[in-house]
Image (cartoon, rainbow, N blue to C red):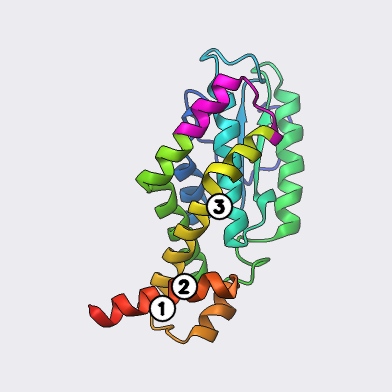
Amino acid sequence: MSRKIHPPYYRTIRVLCTGRVDPLFIFEAFKSGADGVLICGCRLGECKYFEGNLQALITGEFAKIIMKNLGLNENRLKLSWVASTESAKLVVNLVEFFEIIKNLGPLGSEENWDEEDKILYLNCALKICKDVQIRTLLGNIATEIKSLKDFSHQTIAKKLEEKLLKRLNVKLLELEVKTLIKRGLKDFDSLLKKIKADREDLERIYFKTMKQVIKD
């Protein structure tokens, strides 16, 4: 690969298998300054750990759900499957991904985030990824998908939506509201404009949070 022409604007982080890529790694990369994350692993069906890269499919879909809920462009995360002998294909993937990120611009620019917004939302994403209940649900979904032996995008997306999406949305919204209120943004309409959530959902969490703030 060193003899191939490819963009130099990336940092390689090696892991034993893409199945070891935790959702936390993705959002830590964004928080550390990455404008995009490209996960490359063995071709599907050729993992020496049997199902490692199939687990990465589930992780990637989960991360994209969080990104979508934050308003972060999902194209900033890509999974690619290449054999160790396919350096030319890897270079092509890098070049194509670099062009996508170049067109999107720095993380936060497309989303109209300032640096404070960026840290706020990425911290919320990290807390979601650490949440024991969310991680347990994700593990159960992964086990179910593996038992079905169906790792299609449609099946993974369907299972995540059925069993995880509602709980994830609520927790993420709670984190955003609590963080913004602690920062002094206590007016409901201002919060609604900032978060761009469904009014009814926000009202329920807002009044619950404000009662707790007053109580404390």
On the rendered structure, is 14 left or right of 160? left
At 47% from the left and 23% from the top, the residue drawn is 16
Residues at badges 3 and 2 in contact (C-beta under 8 Å)?
no
Residue type indicated by callout 1: Phe
Task: State the image coordinates of residue 157 (x, y, percent, origin top left).
Answer: 65, 40
Region in magenta: 140-154
Q: Nearer the viewer, mark 3 or mark 2?
A: 2
At 46% from the left and 67% from the top, the residue drawn is 176
At 59% from the left and 80% from the top, the residue drawn is 193
Is residue 21 depicted above or below 84 in this figure? below
Mark 3 lies on residue: 66
- Front residue of this view, candidates 131 and 90: 131
Task: State the image coordinates of residue 186 (x, y, percent, origin top left).
Answer: 42, 84
What is the CA distance from the residue labelled 3 to the residue labelled 2?
21 Å
Residue type indicated by callout 3: Ile
Residues at badges 1 and 3 in contact (C-beta under 8 Å)?
no
Magenta stretch, main secondary structure, is helix
Mark identifier at residue 204: 2
Residue type indicated by callout 2: Arg
Placement of the N terminus among the 4 image quadrants: top right
Mark 1 lies on residue: 207
Q: Would you call the spot at circle 3 few (<14 residues within 10 Å), some (14-19), or many (20 or more)?
A: many
Placement of the C terminus among the 4 image quadrants: bottom left
Give the image quarter of residue 73.
Answer: bottom right
Task: State the image coordinates of residue 161 (x, y, percent, origin top left).
Answer: 60, 45
Mark identifier at residue 133: none
Is residue 181 depicted above or below 63 in this figure? below
Q: Is mark 1 on a helix, strand or loop?
A: helix
